[in-house]
Amino acid sequence: AKRAKKAVRGPLDELQKHMEAMDSIDLSRLSLKSSSDLKMARRDLILFVQTLQERLDGALQRIRVALRRLGAEVEATAPAVRKKHGWTPEDTDDAPLHVKYASVLGSNKTSNGEVNKQQLPDGQQSSALNPILVKYQGKGDNPAVSDNLYVKGLPGWITEEDVRAIFSELGAVQSMKLKTADWGAIAFVRLANKREATKAIQELNGRVPKVLIQKAKVQEESKSEEDEIQVSFRAVVDQLERGVLVFVDLMKPCGLQFDDRLNVVAVEAQSSAAEAGVRRGWRLRSISGRPLTDTQDMATVVKSLRCKTNMTRGVSQATLAFSPPPVAVTFSERPFGFSTQRDDRSGLMFVREVGGHARAQGIRRGAVVTAVEGQAISELDEEEVVARIREATLPVQIVFEQAVGLTSSKDEGLVDKVDLDIGGTLA
């Protein structure tokens, strides 16, 4: 982690400096071609930084969900004994990875180039915050004392109201100009006199203002909830596209019985399939990427793979892709207990908030709504789907697809596999 932090922080610092330099150029002084070239270079640089940030955020989202689940399992099963790695359940250092390594995403250097050692108070850390730089406005490292201040290192989501709130605690703000970009923000603030400006530098330079800490905390909590919803939804989409993957040894019985349409009708206790989580009602859709339509297809593919394994003495493991049955819930009274939102990329309607009857029936945030009153909603727009749910005659059956085995901080545990055993119908 330290090597990665050292390797990434330098280039990101350089990118931020380039962005600031480009934003400070007066385009009116340039020729039309030079101005166009500069705008294009700035756009390319922004796209590069955004792509890097999205990849980091995506990795952190997956890590956070895994850590929550592992933490819950450890808390329930692990004895309170210090392990070789030095962790016990009583340890309080539970800060998320994106907080511990926040400096990877930005600079922690002060105006003199030294690394700022300031630590934020417990419970107030945020990956979006770094100590800000406040100095007198002017060129060079030591500009003349004045009532004009230059502020650097502000987060990109800051507003003019935030800047005024920060400096109003230390003096009377006469004027203020804020410039925001994808990499962050800078501000030019004029206070009533030099004394107030000097006090602002003494109080704020190299620190994180309380106004930003409080606002970032609220945003972080909101973003964490949004991340959980999106991770759950993407897991459903992935399950719909690829299925639930189970790895089996082709040279050993897997303990499954199928009907003619490849639906699992029986799972032997303590078999490899049972240990992998396969349940009655699941449909086998492919083996090692080869699509299947019936049991004859399955027998042909298994025989072919076994022959190939025997001839080459290769690995006998195969990947089975299953489609768990959808969850159909019958609602006999309102409110149903869930709200929906359409995903712009896929066009799917997913559950955003859940409670009441819907939660009691096992529906979780991120579940995809596929049918209402027996009609598929794939061709309907968001308003039509909401209207159909709102105006449906009771009792009404709504069908959901949701990921198997996922959990979140606001959902009560894993998917109820007993309910899946009876066909996934909850009424």
Image (cartoon, grey):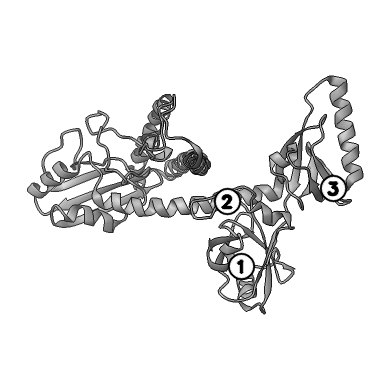
Q: Mark 2 to mark 1: distance in Å?
A: 20 Å
Asked if residue 195 lies left or right of residue 184, the reply is left
Q: Secondary structure at mark 3?
A: strand
Q: Where does residue 216 sit, x and y in percent of width and height?
A: 34, 50
Asked if residue 413 lies left or right of residue 318, the reply is left
Circle 3 residue: 258
Q: Amino acid at mark 3?
A: Phe
Asked if residue 393 lies left or right of residue 311, the reply is left
Q: Earlier in the sequence, mark 2 or mark 1?
A: 2
Q: Where does residue 15 sit, x and y in percent of width and height?
A: 40, 35
Circle 2 residue: 232
> Around disc 1, counting alpha carbons within 10 Å, would you say few (fewer than 14), some (14 to 19), or many (20 or more)?
some
Q: Residue at x 20, y 51 (%)?
A: 189
Q: Mark 2 to mark 3: distance in Å?
A: 29 Å
Q: Where does residue 10 sit, x and y in percent of width and height?
A: 38, 28
Q: Amino acid at mark 2?
A: Ser
Of discs 2 and 3, which sits in the foreground?
A: 3
Circle 1 residue: 382
Q: Amino acid at mark 1?
A: Glu
Q: Earlier in the sequence, mark 2 or mark 3?
A: 2
For residue 88, say whether it is visible.
yes
Do tag 2 and tag 1 residues touch (Cβ < 8 Å)? no
Q: Secondary structure at mark 2?
A: helix
Of discs 2 and 1, which sits in the foreground?
A: 2
Q: Nearer the viewer, residue 67 or 230?
A: 67
> Around disc 3, counting alpha carbons within 10 Å, would you say few (fewer than 14), some (14 to 19), or many (20 or more)?
some
Name the quadrant of the N terminus: top left
